[in-house]
Amino acid sequence: MRHIFFAERELSKVPELDPASPLTIAKAGVVGAGTMGSGIAITFAQSGVPVVVVDTNEEAVDKARQTVMGMFMYQVQKGRLTQEEAWQRGQSITFTDDWSELAGADLVVEAVFEDLDVKREVFAKLDGIVKPEGLLASNTSTLDIDAMAAATKRPEKVLGLHFFVPANIMPLLEIVRGRATSAQTLATAFAVGKTLKKKAVLAGNAFGFIGNRMVFDYVREAFALAEEGTAPARVDAVVKAFGFPMGPFAMSDLSGLDIGLHVQKLQGKSGQGRTNVLERLVEQKRLGQKAMAGFFKYDKAVGKGREPIADPVVEQLFAQEARKAGIAPRVVTDREIRERLLYALINRGAYLLEEGIALRPGDIDIVFVYGYGFPPHHGGPMWYADEVGVALVYERIREFEAAFGPQWKPSALLARIAESGATFAASSCFDPSTSSGQAELSMTPGGVVSNA
Ligand code: NAD
């Protein structure tokens, strides 16, 4: 917990950021009035920043207006807001299908469908409408910020602002730096994070950034365990016993199996799963909690429809598909379940540090504690690696590599720390006041590692 406290204070210490003065964000814009757009609009409104929300779909605009106003009224009922405050917040959000209302915005956050072509079109359109000094951000979960920046004539003012769902509640914000994103744009993003009361973490522009990239590996292992014959409910129970509020299968059900499948396809060959279980479930319309069936089933009478209930049908499906793929069943211990899930996070975290996608181990820990429910008393995945002993983690990862294949290839940074008997915490003493000793973990634009 002390580590998390200090890691939080380090977050905005980024090389070459200090001299840059942030721009003032007096007015914001949001494009896309869906789940994320509505949440982001509420976040700005509750921090006193007026915001314009634009969508091409009139129905989506109406629905967002109702959702947002309904949320403010609910807060009045709960005594969290006065009528007057709710009215003021309501007044500070403008819902419209008229894009010209975005012209005077200092910052516009795009939250349209996760499709690069659609996003590039939106960025090109915004570039022609928003005042030249305005910043353009994308809330994409995975896509390339540079490709969006290239659709504009102001790439230095383009960045990723990755909010987590529900955006008005989740405290984490990943600030994604593109190749051309300027120091001033980043300084402004950190200031926005502060205004919105978020824990803002800098990430390089790579598929899935920090949090999602690591979670993909964690979910890959959860899948692999189920393919080898471990019930999803058991996998989740082990993770919950460690202290997470939910396991990887309940988490996948919550975010939607259709989204999971989409991400798997975007990842191509390296996507999780050696079987077609996910495709089969999506074909059967088992899309997760929203469909009352996914990896688990849900019943309105049990925990208001949010409590995962083990479903033998899914276990059979895993067994069937595993047989087809030639995966032999294995009996695993709870310890192996825990190690495979957590060490997958640690190994990927080490790669992200090595590649300069994450600046410090503590940044990764903040992402997991505030964005994914990693138990704070274990300090986050990288702190946990230190707690276990990096050498032991490394040794186990090598065993997994030998047993399961190249997806477990240990990161060179992990190997180096393990062999020197050091810790992640001690190997990353990044001090912004000195230029020495930070090259190994320093982040250059676009997340390319500098070994200078
Ligand atoms: P959503 O489907 O709920 O909403 C998307 C909205 O964008 C819709 O209202 C749609 O009408 C609108 N839209 C589509 N094309 C448009 C265009 N050209 N111009 C204007 N509006 C357009 O989607 P969502 O879940 O809110 O996700 C939006 C973005 O946020 C995606 O990039 C997604 O990856 C990202 N994201 C989602 C989550 C999540 O868990 N839902 C979390 C973090 C980031």
Image (tube, rainbow, N blue to C red):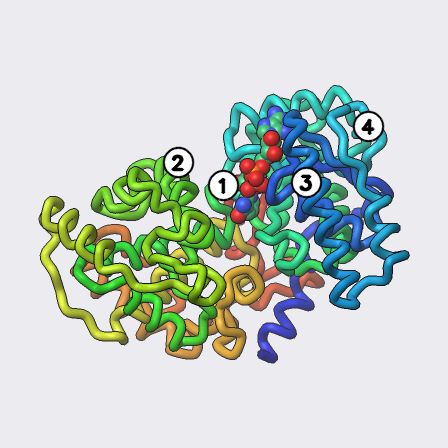
Q: Can the viewer see residue 410 in this picture?
A: yes
Chain-order first, disc 3 or disc 4: 3
Judged from the image, the secondary structure of the residue bearing numbered disc 2 is helix
Chain-order first, disc 4 or disc 2: 4
Chain-order first, disc 3 or disc 1: 3
Is residue 203 rendered to the left or right of residue 52?
left
User: Where is 19 relative to 298, above or below?
Assistant: above
Mark 1 vs 4: CB contact within 8 A: no
Q: Is mark 1 within 8 Å of ligand 1?
A: yes
Mark 3: few, some, or many residues within 10 Å (few <14, many ≥20)?
Answer: many
Mark 1: few, some, or many residues within 10 Å (few <14, many ≥20)?
Answer: many
Distance (Cα) linking label 3 and label 1:
24 Å
**Disc 1 marks which residue?**
142
Mark 1 vs 2: CB contact within 8 A: yes
x and y percentages locating residue 309 in the rendered image: 34, 64
User: Where is 329 relative to 389, above or below?
Assistant: above
Q: Quarter for ligand 1?
A: top right
**Disc 2 marks which residue?**
266
Mark 3 vs 1: CB contact within 8 A: no
- Residue 127: give its label: none
Residue type pointed to by label 1:
Thr
Distance (Cα) linking label 1 and label 2:
9 Å
Mark 3 vs 4: CB contact within 8 A: no
Mark 3 vs 2: CB contact within 8 A: no
Please tell me which residue is depicted at 60% across the width and 64% down the height of the picture: 430
Distance (Cα) linking label 1 and label 4:
28 Å
**Disc 3 marks which residue?**
64
Is residue 197 rendered to the left or right of residue 204?
right
